[in-house]
Structures are given as structure tokens and as C-alpha cells.
Image (cartoon, rainbow, N blue to C red):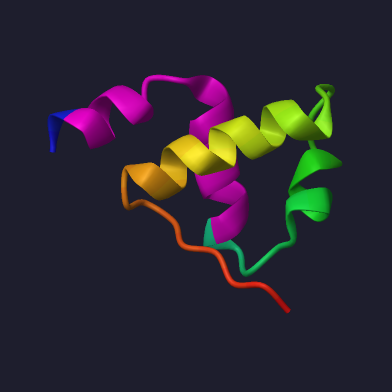
Amino acid sequence: MRKSLNTLTDPTRRRILELLAQGDMTAGKIATHFSMTKPSVSHHLNILKTAGLICNQRQ
């Protein structure tokens, strides 16, 4: 539980969760909402995934 709470202290990760609450999105679509590189967005997504807050699916 503590790891999940620490994960949520970052405003970028909270914003990603807000976006995903609206529906499924690709990593590329999520990245369009931020002024950072796609690898940086991917890093945040991996942290959220490791914390068990999101899951991913390849299509």
C-alpha cells in the first residue's frame, strides 16, 4: 500500500491516472498530453504498472 501512495505523489502519474479514468489510451496518446519525451512517459507508466495501479495490453 505504501508503494502505491508514494507512486501517487508525482503529479505526472496522477494526471496519467486521470486520463486513463476516462478510458483506455495508448502510450502514444497519453504522451500527447505532456511536454516530455515518450521514454519519460513510458517510465511513469512502468512505475504505475509496477505499483499495480494500471495494466497494459498489446494490440
Q: Is 11 a magenta residue? A: yes
Name above or below for residue 3 compared with residue 36.
Answer: below
Viewer-proximal residue among 5 and 41? 41
Residue found at x 83% / y 51%: 28
Relative horizontal placement of residue 53, taking residue 37 as reference (left or right): left
Q: Based on the displayed image, in which of its 4 quarters is residue 7 positioned? A: top left
Residue found at x 81% / y 22%: 36
Q: Position of residue 56 (x, y in %)?
A: 55, 64
Viewer-proximal residue among 7 and 20? 7
Relative horizontal placement of residue 10, taking residue 24 as reference (left or right): left
Q: Based on the displayed image, in which of its 4 quarters is residue 22 positioned? A: bottom right
Relative horizontal placement of residue 27, taking residue 55 as reference (left or right): right
Q: Position of residue 42 (x, y in %)?
A: 66, 38
The C terminus appears in which quarter of the rendering?
A: bottom right
Name above or below for residue 42 compared with residue 37.
Answer: below
Q: How many marks?
A: 0
- Quick one: which residue is furthest to the left in this view? 1
Q: Main secondary structure of the magenta part?
A: helix
Q: Is 19 a magenta residue? A: yes
Q: Position of residue 34 (x, y in %)?
A: 79, 30
Q: Position of residue 2 (x, y in %)?
A: 14, 29
Relative horizontal placement of residue 14, taking residue 22 as reference (left or right): left
The N terminus appears in which quarter of the rendering?
A: top left
Region of the chain picked out in magenta, as a range: 3-20
Residue found at x 75% / y 31%: 39
Viewer-proximal residue among 18 and 45? 45
Q: Based on the displayed image, in which of its 4 quarters is residue 5 positioned? A: top left
Residue found at x 36% / y 51%: 53
